[in-house]
């Protein structure tokens, strides 16, 4: 986008550069013949999750307390958690939890696309994963989660994957939590909710639900686009069911990291 | 939000009161404070509105100005659609901690909330009508909100004010001509008519949503929380509902806890009920604002500050 805010953290390209416009027609994005990767409408993409790849046995200071790498189809996200440690913003009663979300410059289909909403997503992630952490156990300290999206495929799906990744990293860091947060996203195609939409499948209306199964609490709801109340409730219900399945995968990854 | 320090007994009082259905100012859990609306007070803007929730001196005060500008299309943008850009700024006059970069996080959060509700087809506005010439020029509506005072319920005040401002916005009429250039190709040119009387409203503004923010205090929820109630809130949910009672946007705020799915469902039902009652109330206020005359109140200053 010309005139976009300059991102000072990166070396920007020329002021006006755009993604090339392809002349060949894109793959048929309608779901008439089923999804392009053969999944069912209520199936998530296969998940690979690993806790602790950035472990450092030599150094004890300056290294991440916990880390995780999460893959879901072509979404690849890595997260490092630092904390509890002394921080700038301290609260006498509870820890200060903050997420820092960042796209790698090559993560999205358009390079300039990455800069726009990182700050807003960071705030959303803090609000969604925050309820899971026992903040009262760490007064006057700071817990920071740094999320880097290496590859993104579907905006809502990437957000959901980021939430899962942060949960995994926090657990790996040994931070006391009520439960790990599992999230999943859905897109509305016609009158049907489709689980885990890729960028091709993404529609005008999408929904994200983050859920803690053991405590039975929804920690984050996000809806983009317009839909009726009944459809919304249907989606929340379906999302919570899928979240339980994602939760199982995250737990298994945590168990594997202990072996 | 502004950090109001409450003693543990005050917090307990509010929490238990809400659980029993009592609020400090006597409202019911689904009652909103009194809303005052004024429109079209900023002559430089294409549309403007000021909304105060709560009474004089003790309310959340928001001023929204809409400026329409013509933007040139660049490749990669949608070909025949206009755009709406929202921006919220909290003025230091609202709270001391908003001075300098103190309000940055809050500004980002509120901007994102407004953007989620208004930027796009879910707002009800016909974005294709904001296009002047496809692949060439389109209207950009800059929605700039200035928060003048915060006493709880900021999101709702923002949405009410934005809705009123967009309803009152008048775009200059545009005349599009096709002229043949040297090669015989048809080029489109447009001219913006510079006549204050010859202006059009934006198409689809009647479909704009209103928002209801639910704050969870203890095991119950309330709408339109006052400052004290917000200090005790553990989680909040903002729901935007269109006049056709569809859900346009849902956003959860607050990092202390989540909602059980059953409570979430209850909140969504309540959102629709409350919104259904609020649309006629909004219309009444908007019509009254439109017919508000400067001389009606005793002059204690300019019209702008008069009723507020």
Image (cartoon, coloured by chain):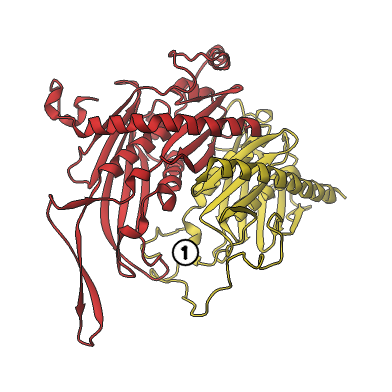
Rendered location of residue B190, percent (x, y): 21, 67
Q: Is residue B230 above or below residue A173?
A: above
Residue B99 shows up from this direction: no
Which residue corresponds to the image point at 36% horizontal and 54% vertical from the top-left?
A: B126
Q: Taking B19 as reference, is A251 left or right?
A: right
Q: How many marks?
A: 1
Quarter in which the N terminus of chain A is drawn: bottom left
Q: Residue furthest bottom?
A: B183
Q: How many neighbours does mark 1 have within 10 angstroms: few (below 14), some (14-19), or many (20 or more)?
A: many
**Which chain is tinted red?**
B
Left or right? Give the position of B184 relative to A4: left
Residue A94 position in % (x across, y down):
62, 29
* Residue under the image location 37 percent in, 48 percent down: B86
Q: Is residue B301 visible?
A: yes
Camera-side residue of A192 and A202:
A192
Picture quarter containing residue B217? top right
Nearer to us in this view, B265 or A107: B265
Q: Chain of mark 1?
A: A
Q: At 67% from the left edge and 45% from the top edge, which residue is drawn?
A: A238
Is B307 left, or right, of B129 in this rendering? Answer: left
Q: Quadrant of residue A85?
A: top right
User: Residue A241 in the image: x percent, y percent?
Assistant: 71, 44
Q: Position of residue B301 (x, y in %)?
A: 15, 26
- Most distant residue in the right direction: A259
Residue depicted at 51% across the width and 52% down the height: A118
Identify the residue under disc 1. A112
The secondary structure type at the circle numbered 1 is helix
The answer to whether B171 is drawn above or below residue A219 in the figure is: below
| Foreground residue among B200 and B13 | B200
* Rendered position, B198 above or below B251: below
The colour with which the image depicts chain A is yellow
């Amino acid at each position: 986008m010309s005139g976009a805010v300059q991102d000072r953290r990166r070396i920007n390209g020329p002021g006006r550069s755009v993604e090339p416009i392809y002349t060949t027609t894109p793959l048929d994005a309608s779901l008439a013949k089923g999804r392009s990767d053969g999944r069912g409408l209520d199936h998530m993409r296969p998940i690979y999750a690993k806790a602790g790849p950035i472990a450092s046995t030599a150094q004890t200071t300056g290294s991440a307390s916990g880390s995780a790498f999460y893959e879901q189809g072509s979404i690849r996200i890595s997260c490092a958690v630092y904390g509890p440690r002394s921080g700038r913003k301290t609260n006498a009663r509870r820890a200060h939890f903050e997420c820092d979300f960042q796209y790698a410059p090559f993560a999205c289909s358009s390079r300039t696309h990455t800069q726009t909403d990182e700050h807003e997503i960071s705030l959303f992630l803090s609000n969604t994963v925050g309820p899971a952490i026992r903040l009262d156990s760490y007064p006057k300290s700071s817990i920071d989660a740094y999320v880097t999206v290496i590859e993104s495929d579907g905006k809502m799906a990437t957000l959901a994957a980021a939430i899962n990744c942060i949960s995994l990293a926090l657990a790996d860091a040994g931070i006391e939590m009520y439960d790990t947060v599992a999230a999943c996203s859905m897109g509305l195609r016609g009158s049907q909710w489709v689980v885990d939409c890729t960028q091709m499948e993404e529609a005008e209306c999408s929904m994200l639900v983050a859920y803690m199964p053991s405590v039975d609490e929804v920690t984050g709801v996000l809806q983009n686009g317009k839909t009726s109340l009944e459809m919304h409730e249907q989606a929340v219900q379906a999302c919570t069911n899928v979240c339980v399945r994602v939760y199982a995968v995250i737990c298994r990854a945590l168990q594997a990291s202990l072996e | 939000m502004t950090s109001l320090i409450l003693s543990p007994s005050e917090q307990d009082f509010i929490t238990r009161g809400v659980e029993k259905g009592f609020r400090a100012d006597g409202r019911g859990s689904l009652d909103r404070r009194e809303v005052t609306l004024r429109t079209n007070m900023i002559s430089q803007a294409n549309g403007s509105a000021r909304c105060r929730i709560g009474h004089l001196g003790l309310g959340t005060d928001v001023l929204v100005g809409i400026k329409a500008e013509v933007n040139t299309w660049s490749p990669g943008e949608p070909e025949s659609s206009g755009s709406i850009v929202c921006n919220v700024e909290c003025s230091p006059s609202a709270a001391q901690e908003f001075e300098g970069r103190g309000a940055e996080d809050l500004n980002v959060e509120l901007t994102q909330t407004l953007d989620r509700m208004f930027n796009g087809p879910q707002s009800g506005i016909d974005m294709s009508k904001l296009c002047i010439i496809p692949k060439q020029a389109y209207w950009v509506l800059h929605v700039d909100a200035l928060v003048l005072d915060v006493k709880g319920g900021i999101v709702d005040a923002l949405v009410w004010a934005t809705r009123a401002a967009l309803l009152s916005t008048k775009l200059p009429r545009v005349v599009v001509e096709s002229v043949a250039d040297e090669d015989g190709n048809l080029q489109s040119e447009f001219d913006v008519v510079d006549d204050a009387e010859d202006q059009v409203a934006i198409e689809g503004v009647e479909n704009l949503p209103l928002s209801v923010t639910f704050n969870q205090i203890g095991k119950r929820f309330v709408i339109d929380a006052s400052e004290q109630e917000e200090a005790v809130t553990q989680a909040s949910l903002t729901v935007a509902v269109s006049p056709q009672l569809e859900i346009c946007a849902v956003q959860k705020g607050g990092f202390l806890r989540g909602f059980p799915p059953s409570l979430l469902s209850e909140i969504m039902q309540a959102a629709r009920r409350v919104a259904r009652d609020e649309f006629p109330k909004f219309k009444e206020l908007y019509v009254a604002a439109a017919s508000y005359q400067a001389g009606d109140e005793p002059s204690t200053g300019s019209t702008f500050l008069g009723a507020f």
